[in-house]
Image (tube, rainbow, N blue to C red):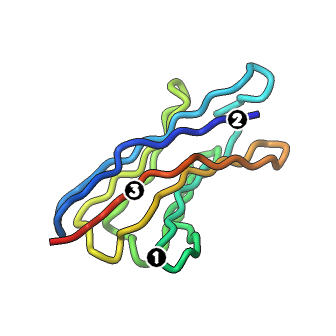
Amino acid sequence: QVQLVESGGGFVQPGESLKLSCVASGSIFSLRFNAMDLGWYRQGPGGQRDLVARITRSGITTYADSVKGRFTISRDNAKNRAYLQMNRLKPEDTGVYYCYSVSSTGSGSWGQGTQVTVSS
């Protein structure tokens, strides 16, 4: 079983930046971090959880159109961490951000989420 813990959320004004972090932990048999695909999802007021950014085990990244050019997803396999650098934040970026991992066997895990609020 893989556990994911997000951090780095907060309250910021439009145009500011935040960097989210997700750390993975688990048994030596379940945690093969470098073999995982990772993603960040946002859950807005409507309750739907949408993909924001994704990075594969080989480092290929994809982004939602709404965040292209502003957000950057990255990973540090040595530290079992994934990051989401969010620049030029907008009020519509507000939501709970969740880290998601998919192992090489197809098993998925979610973190508990971190709140991001962008408001003037």
Q: Secondary structure at mark 2?
A: strand
- In the picture of the structure, the residue carrying the numbered disc 1 is 45
- In the picture of the structure, the residue carrying the numbered disc 2 is 2
Can you say whether 119 is above or below 111 in the image? below
Distance from disc 1 to disc 3, alpha carbons, whole Å, reads: 12 Å
Distance from disc 3 to disc 2, alpha carbons, whole Å, reads: 21 Å
Q: Secondary structure at mark 1?
A: loop
**Of pointers 3 and 2, the one earlier in the residue sequence:** 2
- In the picture of the structure, the residue carrying the numbered disc 3 is 115
Q: Given the image, on which type of amino acid does mark 2 rest?
A: Val
**Of pointers 1 and 3, the one earlier in the residue sequence:** 1
Q: Quadrant of the C terminus?
A: bottom left
Distance from disc 1 to disc 2, alpha carbons, whole Å, reads: 27 Å
Q: Residue at x 28, y 75 (%)?
A: 91
Q: Residue at x 39, y 71 (%)?
A: 68
Q: Given the image, on which type of amino acid does mark 3 rest?
A: Gln
Q: Given the image, on which type of amino acid does mark 1 rest?
A: Pro
Q: Secondary structure at mark 3?
A: strand
